[in-house]
Amino acid sequence: MARQSRTPACAIVKILPHSNATLDTFEASRDTARLVTRYTLAKDLIMLRINGEPVEASHIDKAVAQMRPQYYQFMQQRGEAPDDARLRQWAQESVVEQMLLQQESASIELSATPAAKEKTTSGKRSDEAKQKFKMLIDSVVGKVSVPTDAEVESFYTDNPTQFQTPEQVHAAHIVKHTQNGETNDAAYREMLNIKSQLDKGTAFEALASEHSDCSDNAGDLGTFPRGQMVQEFEDIVFSMHPDEVSDVFQSPFGYHIVKLYEKMDAQVIPFDQVREKLAEHMLDSRRSEAMRTFVAALKKKATIEDDDA
């Protein structure tokens, strides 16, 4: 009846942790060579010609396979079922954008630097293409201004809820599991008997170790915020006061008695603790936006044909 890290028999099913993930999660990366895509597409393309250059279906299939693990994780965080058609649309758009960038980078002259000359004369055409691609990306994101200290502090001040540790509690419980959360008179009577012993002064930890169906660590669940336990359990434990022991109550997993050890209020993280990472986040966001704007301009002037249409 604890958090997901415990054994299945003792697990309270957790709601997925809150995530600020958006589609931009796929775009934001410290590696500028991956700051290149925004996964949106109006229709399902099977084979394309991009400025006359063909794209085989196998190319799109490969992109789907590469994106699938991250896509499934993203959809799970959003609490949505994966949609393979949607994944294919995003993969196809990724292929379109990558090819547009490759086409744009092909015109870059590598002889501008000694290092570039060495690459050019090496005879490795794939290395040359990669360098051109990276030079294009660097030229776009390199124009982005680094956030000033004042801008970083202003963002921190204007978005206080983004820099808070949530309210948390430290609690333990005694549980008797029931089949599919159904009423079980015997289990309920046993829990009432345990509560009676608690009311007479018997130590909670001793009774948890002896009688609970989840007796590890004397029922100690550790510290957790809202959103990690089933609603029935959460409603009780977050309404309690430190050292308080609850009455018997029921959840989809059975009957519980909870003891609250400590309650910690939400707290604002000091600016000095987040300054550096916030500045990096703001810079990455600006780079991603610069790439989106640049790619959008490439799309606007490109000729993209659907050979399957």
Image (cartoon, rainbow, N blue to C red):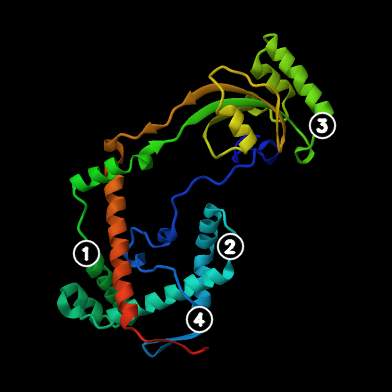
First in sequence, mark 1 or 4: give its number.
4
First in sequence, mark 3 or 2: give its number.
2
Residue assigned mark 2: 82
Label 1: how many residues lie within 10 Å, few (<14), some (14-19) or many (20+)? some
Tell whether 265 sits left or right of 288.
right
Residue assigned mark 4: 45
Residue assigned mark 3: 184
Is disc 2 in contact with disc 4, using a CB cutoff of under 8 Å? no
First in sequence, mark 4 or 3: give its number.
4
Question: From mark 1 to mark 3, how far is it between C-alphas?
Answer: 66 Å
**Amino acid of disc 3:** Asn
For residue 103, the mark is none
**Amino acid of disc 2:** Pro
Q: Which quarter of the image is occupied by the N terminus?
A: top right
Question: Which of the two marks, 1 or 4, is nearer to us in this view?
Answer: 4
Residue, x 43% and y 76% (percent of image)? 95
User: At which x and y percent is residue 287?
Assistant: 28, 61
Residue assigned mark 1: 142
User: At which x and y percent is residue 59?
Assistant: 49, 79
Relative height, residue 260 to residue 6 (above, below): above
Residue at disc 3, secondary structure: loop
